[in-house]
Amino acid sequence: MLSIVIIGTGNVAHHLLKTFQKIKDVNVVQVFGRKQSNLVAFDNDVATTTDFGSLKKADMYLIAVSDDVISMVSGHLKDTDALVVHTSGSANLNEIQAKRKGVFYPLQTLSKDTAINFKEVPLCLEASNSEDLGVLNSIAAQLSDSVYSINSEKRKSLHLAAVFVNNFTNHFYHIANTICEKENLSFDILNPLIKETIKKVSELSPKLAQTGPAKRNDVITMQNHLDMLSNSIHKKIYQLVSESIRLTHEEKL
Amino acid sequence: MLSIVIIGTGNVAHHLLKTFQKIKDVNVVQVFGRKQSNLVAFDNDVATTTDFGSLKKADMYLIAVSDDVISMVSGHLKDTDALVVHTSGSANLNEIQAKRKGVFYPLQTLSKDTAINFKEVPLCLEASNSEDLGVLNSIAAQLSDSVYSINSEKRKSLHLAAVFVNNFTNHFYHIANTICEKENLSFDILNPLIKETIKKVSELSPKLAQTGPAKRNDVITMQNHLDMLSNSIHKKIYQLVSESIRLTHEEKL
């Protein structure tokens, strides 16, 4: 049985707690949060604390906090003999100030309000020694069918790619939604197109799958679209992404 | 039996010919293309011509060409008593120079190399009179389970929204793909994330579904990502879309 303390109260902490509680070999003994108010959602499931001095003893400390405070948080654990692990896509393994360091990065978009099938979440692992990588592997294999050992550099690239395919794509769904709302059109009418967009890239490379006015350099349609966008930053996005598509297909990029 | 001449040889013409040939009440009698070389792919299936003077008589002319030449092409049909229809998302109904005008817009990304289930393609129809709208409706209903009567203004908005959810999203898949290739990572590792991104927006609004460094205004991670992008236009896209996400979530947009 591996005992774990989770440090952090955000989306990743929330989902990992739920998922760890479903497997036998792991026992989450405590969740740490800076603010009492953020711990309310956890209080029924596990012991909680707001005080680094009151962290329970555990085999592993799992730091699921913003990248910019990983180093500071791990500083509280620099003398522990336990394995100290962060869950970030972009922070280096060495940002952890502890003797035994690891990374346990779920390559997925996690929101508190959305259930997730962890079996399908790619888990990207790294550790400062092979024994600890083995520990992470044995936990990961119980959670997911897709477990990868990936070093910090490659993980950072994956995280950057993930920002494009998820964060930025989702923001474009938001922009499309505002365009539909303005005309009282249901966003649902776009669903078949959204589905086909992802189906296509399983069959063709994204470059070959590209269609639309920017690829055709259809200047009149693009100007009409710009005229329809009232928001100046959405206009700039339209121009820039269209230019990027055009240059890509003219092999200038 | 409704006879149709298709004008154009691109992706839309290609898919509509294939689809029309599957239904009983429609007979595609000819395909027009400016260049003989573009007609080669059609020659085995249907009569073809490169000469406007040799267009066959038909009940309907379906113009599937670039938006900027719809008006010019339809000028060749201004004296016909047949229904003249374009397939564009953004061209106005009135760009057609003919007595009986219509629009038959498939809201889908169509590439020649990808098969499509037309039953799931939303068809957006418009016509200058209700009788012709009825004609278009009766054809559309045989092709698709999603048929909408939508005026030119709303159709243009839908097309603009479609550019964001398909063209721009697909380009971001391309950028992600280049990032993965550089590190010898398989693009497939991103598939669960891509799928979850679209699943989430069927459950939450895109605004609520947003996650990532830009939403959190995680400046360090964003700067790291910018340092990793070697292409200057990709850098600019990263900055601009991140700014748009941040402003949206600060309710400043």
Image (cartoon, coloured by chain):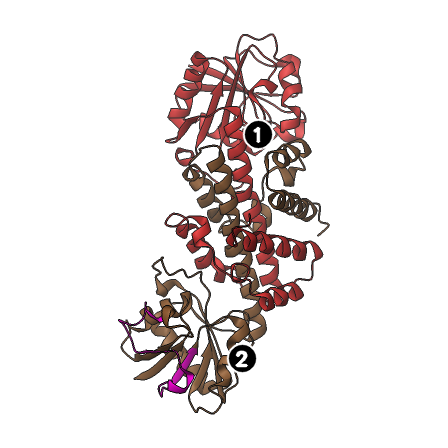
Chain colours: A brown, B red
Q: Indicate the position of residue B23 as horizontal and vertical percent values.
A: 40, 24
**Residue type at mark 2?**
Ser
Q: Is B119 or B146 nearer to us in this picture?
A: B146
Q: Nearest to the eye among marks 1 and 2: give it.
A: 2
Q: Dot 1 corresponds to which residue? A: B90
Q: Which residues are magenta?
A: A39-62
A10 sits left or right of A150 in the view:
left
Instruction: Examine the residues drawn in magenta and state their main secondary structure.
Output: loop
Residue A49 is inside the magenta segment: yes
Give the answer, above or below, for where A31 lies relative to B145.
below
The chain holding disc 1 is B
User: Against A119, is B16 above or below?
Assistant: above
Q: Position of residue A191 (x, y in %)?
A: 43, 41
Residue type at mark 1: give it: Ser
The secondary element bearing badge 2 is classed as helix
Q: Which mark is residue A71?
A: 2
